[in-house]
């Protein structure tokens, strides 16, 4: 890989940046040689504590105990709101850009503070107490931020469920986390179409007896079905209560939120994050990685239903007193120039999006970009999946006109914040590489036997020591936390990703090495899609794999074996697709269903996914060893009938 292009640090970026390369080296060295001293300094620098900690860190990668700043007291909402009031009460906190380009709104820190206090009082009046779980199923509207911060203010634990998930998925998450209250909207709006959120909640609640209250934001004129006593309007309730609500004093290790994410087996896991370490790490990474300076307009295009929305629309930016833009719509509505129009309209300086969006917009041609100014842009970011060098180059040269460093940020729901990334004023860039570890992060590459590989190497990516925003457990199932992340390579946190380290020590993430799909930056377990397919009475068996997809990164390829005597048909294909959509949500829609009379299995009955992945990717000349198959003839049949879509 000697022909990889290197883009040196841009002189303007270096001149302005909080951190140059020398400082990166020195701070990184300090963070590794004396982590407790390093993190104590950062904790004093970034966070307002009601009481300081007794111990900076205490963790063990065998028992899965992970504690940071134990004994310290703080409140996350206080850090995002109250402490800014004196210096920036009248500064904008949130710029909201609606789905409709004519609709927007600006909310100052003082207004946000008052809205959060009011809503926290509403939650209290409905009996929500410290430690209770609250489900948030909202579109991208400011009330989502208000609801999250109101939970944090009173010590309730929020569980945000992405508005694109089906009633079935919503129900599973409500039951697993034991929520008593759901916060939703009558409808969401995306790309000019309405999303029936309240109706979805009603469907989910037919099997959630624990929910006593549904608080409904009136976002459109639609009148939803109403159950008096249980359903209450957000705007009516907040009008009745006080604009003051004291922030609950929380322990650093008290839970802040649960967020469900897909793994390689079983149902999605409730990833649990706590308060002190999480808010410190998200604030610090937000400031240094996006080189945020006071007054900058910062826009992360993620949805608050994903971890990127939690950490880098809400918590990190607000802890830093930033101006954070929240966008309700989609990149292609009213047309594929929308992102750049919004950049110009609000004079966005820092823009953070996903490779799938970049690829989709790249495919629409340069004119849609070039018709806008984008002169305000200073820094570009990428997250969610590996960015292919072609998309990186387009983002850099066409969108950024060669003026803006790209931060390709690698991290996960489980890591809470960004772990591997360039810093805009410090790191020479290589298109497609997430480059170097952030402070305190020690990655390693291990082979399948668990041996640590030194120097230039490719293998499985692990992290060898804890960092403050690491997930603490799987909600309600600590053993699953240990089994999933700590057992595979004992003594290390296993990421589930593959990676290569080059001669300069740069990391190149190669994608998941487990049965997790990454479709348009959305994580899905193959097992989840398979479980949905086999619910159909005509399906005997299903195996799902990912395959390379130009825009989505990965597409979903499903091999389906029907019951004896059932004939495949277009109608059945549609039924199966609808079944997956209603069980999980539109993001899980299979791109291809191949009828498979049989699946390749070992003699012990294990499906050989390696072979199915190769057939899906059309890499049939190189299937590897198939001698252990129970019936090698199955493979020939699958190749012959392979879909060429
Ligand atoms: C933040 C987020 C995590 C998985 C992760 C990896 C992939 C994320 C990436 C990246 C290459 C990047 N991923 N960022 N791969 N380069 N910059 O996306 O969290 O939804 O939990 O997904 O996404 O495979 O393991 P999450």
Image (cartoon, rainbow, N blue to C red):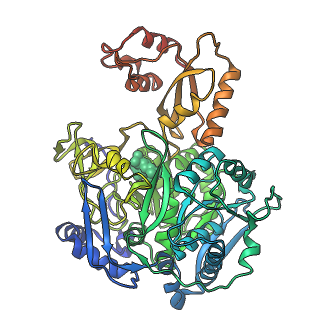
Find residue 224 and report its horizontal and vertical position in percent.
80, 57
Residue at x-position 49% and y-position 86% = 83
- The quadrant of the picture occupied by the C terminus is top right
Residue at x-position 71% and y-position 54% = 197
Find residue 194 and report its horizontal and vertical position in percent.
75, 52
Res 302 seen here: yes
In the rendered view, tell whether residue 305 sits above or below residue 152.
above
Find residue 487 and report its horizontal and vertical position in percent.
27, 45
In the rendered view, tell whether residue 390 sits above or below residue 304.
above
Q: Which quadrant holds residue 129?
A: bottom right
* Side of 636 relative to 29 (left or right): right
Find residue 232 and report its horizontal and vertical position in percent.
75, 67
Q: How many marks?
A: 0
Residue at x-position 55% and y-position 46% = 362
Res 349 seen here: no
Front residue of 441 and 397: 441
* Side of 219 relative to 490 (left or right): right
* Side of 484 relative to 402 (left or right): left
């Amino acid at each position: 890989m000697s022909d990889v292009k290197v883009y040196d640090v841009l002189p303007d970026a270096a001149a302005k940046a909080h951190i140059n390369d020398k400082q990166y080296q020195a701070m990184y060295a300090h963070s590794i040689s004396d982590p407790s001293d390093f993190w104590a300094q950062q904790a004093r620098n970034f966070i307002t504590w009601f009481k300081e900690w007794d111990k900076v860190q205490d963790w063990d990668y065998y028992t899965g105990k992970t504690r940071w700043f134990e004994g310290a007291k703080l409140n996350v909402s206080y850090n995002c709101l109250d402490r800014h009031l004196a210096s920036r009460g009248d500064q904008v906190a949130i710029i909201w850009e609606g789905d409709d380009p004519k609709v927007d709104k600006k909310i100052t820190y003082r207004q946000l503070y008052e809205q959060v206090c009011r809503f926290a009082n509403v939650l209290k009046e409905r009996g929500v107490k410290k430690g209770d779980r609250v489900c948030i199923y909202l579109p991208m509207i400011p009330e989502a931020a208000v609801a999250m911060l109101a939970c944090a203010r009173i010590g309730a634990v929020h569980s945000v469920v992405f508005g694109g998930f089906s009633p079935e998925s919503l129900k599973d998450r409500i039951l697993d986390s034991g929520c008593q209250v759901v916060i939703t909207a009558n409808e969401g709006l995306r790309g000019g179409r309405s999303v029936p959120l309240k109706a979805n909640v009603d469907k989910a609640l037919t099997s959630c007896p624990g929910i006593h209250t549904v608080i409904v934001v009136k976002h459109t004129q639609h009148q939803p079905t109403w159950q008096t006593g249980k359903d209450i309007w957000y705007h009516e309730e907040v009008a009745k209560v006080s604009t003051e609500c004291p922030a609950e004093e929380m322990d650093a290790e008290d839970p802040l939120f649960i967020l469900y994410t897909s793994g390689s087996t079983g149902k999605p896991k409730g990833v649990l994050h706590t308060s002190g370490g999480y808010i410190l790490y998200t604030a610090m990474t937000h400031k240094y990685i996006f080189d945020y300076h006071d007054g900058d307009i910062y826009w992360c295009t993620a949805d608050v239903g994903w971890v990127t929305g939690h950490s880098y629309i809400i918590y990190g930016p607000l802890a830093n007193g930033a101006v954070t833009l929240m966008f309700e719509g989609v990149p292609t509505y009213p047309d594929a120039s929308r992102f750049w129009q919004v950049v110009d309209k609000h004079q966005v300086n820092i823009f953070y999006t996903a490779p799938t969006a970049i690829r989709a917009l790249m495919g629409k041609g340069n004119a849609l970009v070039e018709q806008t100014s984008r002169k305000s842009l200073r820094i570009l970011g990428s997250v969610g999946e590996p960015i292919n060098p072609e998309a990186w180059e387009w983002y850099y040269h066409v969108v950024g006109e060669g003026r803006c460093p790209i931060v390709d940020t690698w991290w996960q729901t489980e890591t809470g914040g960004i772990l591997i990334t360039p810093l805009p004023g410090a790191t020479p860039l290589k298109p497609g590489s997430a480059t170097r570890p952030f402070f305190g992060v020690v990655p390693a590459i291990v082979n399948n036997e668990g041996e640590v590989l030194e120097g230039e190497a490719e293998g499985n990516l692990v992290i060898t020591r804890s960092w403050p925003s690491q997930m603490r457990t799987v909600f309600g199932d600590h053993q699953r936390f240990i089994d999933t992340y700590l057992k595979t390579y004992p003594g290390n946190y296993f990421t589930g990703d593959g990676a290569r380290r080059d001669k300069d020590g740069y990391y190149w993430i190669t994608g998941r090495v487990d049965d997790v799909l990454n479709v348009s930056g959305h994580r899905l377990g193959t097992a989840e899609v398979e479980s949905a397919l086999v619910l159909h009475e005509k399906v005997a068996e299903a195996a799902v794999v990912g395959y390379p997809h130009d825009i989505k990164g990965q597409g979903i390829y499903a091999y389906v074996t029907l019951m004896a005597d059932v004939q495949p048909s277009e109608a059945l294909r549609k039924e199966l697709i609808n079944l997956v959509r209603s069980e999980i949500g539109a993001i899980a829609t299979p791109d291809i269903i191949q009828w498979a009379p049989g699946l390749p299995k070992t003699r012990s009955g294990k499906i050989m996914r390696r072979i199915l992945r190769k057939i899906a990717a059309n890499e049939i000349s190189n299937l590897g060893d198939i001698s252990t198959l129970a019936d090698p003839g199955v493979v020939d049949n699958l190749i012959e009938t392979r879909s060429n879509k």
